[in-house]
């Protein structure tokens, strides 16, 4: 009997040892798992801190590079480039910036060999596509402040919707731009489909000199945009209409040369993100927005565009820039072509084609030009896809 009790005790002791060993192993596993979790959390925290400390959450380029920007003087849609430059964002990302300044899209496109990226109105984009195989890589604005003005105390100011009052009038505007698009749409809206039938003459005038010419007595009406439109109004001229009032789509695009896309991909991709993220930074606080207004005024002064604080505040308030995510989605998404012929295009393409399709009705472009844009992929999602 005693032998059985001893044997039982030994078995019990052995069992206890096994249990204790098992408990110890489980404890060690839990400790190891806890340490692994802690390490991962620490790594994630460090990554988050690094992103917070980095410039706009972007990684600097491996080597110093220079970005040449086609800069639209006096336009809010050029403002993010300038703010990013003056706030040091480009510098911190290992990018030097050079500016090539313009006040009209056709001239900008003609000089496209001198820049890598630009921001420009829809007609400027189309001009670049037709004549220089330019690529639109994003949408950056919808310029509502593109207006038609007449002098006060004139027959036009008293009855702007009467076709007969427009007979024989001269209109100052830069042809081939959004200004012509807006003016012709307004003419059509009041029943004037053929300018020649009413002896209406468009005098092709650069935007930068249009208001000055009008102030000296040239023309009966003028079409200008952005800072020039605000200045025309402050001069006491009557705003007949504008893109916003007519509910027209008037996108502006970010364009890039094929050479830049192919040979400077990282530079263009980073600059693309900087543009949209800078605007997001501007909107993040009242302090940031105040700084953006200050820098925009500085930019206009540098470019010889006369503005006031009121003008700058108004232009920035009207700026219709998208977020980075929205810009990428517009370039990479798919929807039915607005022509209703069964094809699919990106949302950005449809927005640009709203302007193009109107110009086709005027004879400025053809259906063949439209198809060439599609065939060549000039609404180019390469950069958007690279950062998607």
Image (cartoon, rainbow, N blue to C red):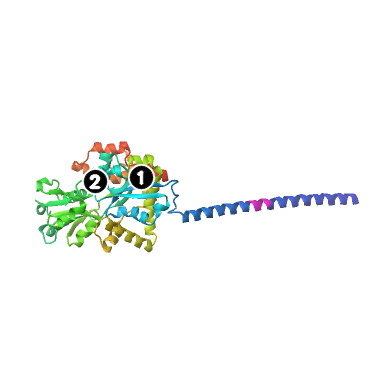
Q: Is residue 225 left or right of residue 36?
A: left
Label whose residue precedes the other's in the sequence (2 or 1)? 2
State which quadrant residue 162 falls in.
bottom left
Q: How many marks?
A: 2
Main SS, magenta region, reads helix
> Quick check: can you spot residue 353?
no
Report x, y in % for residue 168: 9, 51
- In the rendered image, residue 322, in percent from the top left (x then y), is placed at 35, 52
Confirm whether residue 184 shows in the render.
yes
As rendered, which of 35 and 212 lies closer to the eye?
A: 212
Check residue 31 for magenta coloring. Answer: yes
Q: Is residue 201 left or right of residue 104?
A: left
Q: Residues within 10 Å of mark 1 (few under 14, many from 20)?
A: many
- Where residue 288 appears, as percent x and y from the top left, is 37, 61
Quadrant, the C terminus:
top left
Instruction: Identify the residue at horizontal 21%, vertical 45% (top origin).
Output: 176
Residue 331: assigned label: 1
Magenta-span inclusion, residue 111: no
Give the residue at mark 2.
107
Above-or-below relation of 316 to 255: below
Q: Is residue 229 left or right of residue 382?
A: left
Front residue of 92 and 280: 92
Instruction: Tell me how far mark 2 sits from mark 1, CA to CA.
Output: 26 Å
Segment colored magenta: 28-32
């Amino acid at each position: 009997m005693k032998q059985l009790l001893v044997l039982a005790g030994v078995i019990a002791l052995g069992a206890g040892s096994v249990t204790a060993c098992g408990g110890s192993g489980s404890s060690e596993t839990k400790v190891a798992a806890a340490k692994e979790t802690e390490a991962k959390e620490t790594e994630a925290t460090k990554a988050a801190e690094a992103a917070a400390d980095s410039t706009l959450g972007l990684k600097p380029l491996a080597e110093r590079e220079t970005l040449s920007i086609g800069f639209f003087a006096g336009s809010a849609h050029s403002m993010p480039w300038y703010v990013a430059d003056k706030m040091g964002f480009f510098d911190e990302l290992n990018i030097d910036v050079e500016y090539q300044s313009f006040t009209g899209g056709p001239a900008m496109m003609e000089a496209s060999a001198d820049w890598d990226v630009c921001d420009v109105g829809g007609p400027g984009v189309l001009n670049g596509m037709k004549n220089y195989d330019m690529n639109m890589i994003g949408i950056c604005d919808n310029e509502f402040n593109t207006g038609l003005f007449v002098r006060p105390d004139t027959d036009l100011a008293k009855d702007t919707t009467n076709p007969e009052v427009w007979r024989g009038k001269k209109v100052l505007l830069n042809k081939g731009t959004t200004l012509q698009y807006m003016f012709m749409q307004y003419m059509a809206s009041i029943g004037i489909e053929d300018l020649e039938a009413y002896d209406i003459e468009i005098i092709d005038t650069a935007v930068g000199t249009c208001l000055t010419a009008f102030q000296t007595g040239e023309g009966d009406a003028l079409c200008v945009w952005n800072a020039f439109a605000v200045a025309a109004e402050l001069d006491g001229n009557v705003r007949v209409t504008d893109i916003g009032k007519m509910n027209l789509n008037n996108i502006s695009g970010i364009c890039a040369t094929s050479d830049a896309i192919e040979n400077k991909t990282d530079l263009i991709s980073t600059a693309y993100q900087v543009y949209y993220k800078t605007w997001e930074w501007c909107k993040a606080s009242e302090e940031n927005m105040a700084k953006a207004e200050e820098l925009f005024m500085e930019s206009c002064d540098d470019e010889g565009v006369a503005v006031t604080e009121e003008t700058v505040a108004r232009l920035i308030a009207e700026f219709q820039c998208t977020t980075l995510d929205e810009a990428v989605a517009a370039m990479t998404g798919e929807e039915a072509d607005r022509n209703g012929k069964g094809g699919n295009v990106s949302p950005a393409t449809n927005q640009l084609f709203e302007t193009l399709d109107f110009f086709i009705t005027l004879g400025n472009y053809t259906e063949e030009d439209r198809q060439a844009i599609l065939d060549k992929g000039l609404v180019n999602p390469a950069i958007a896809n690279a950062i998607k």
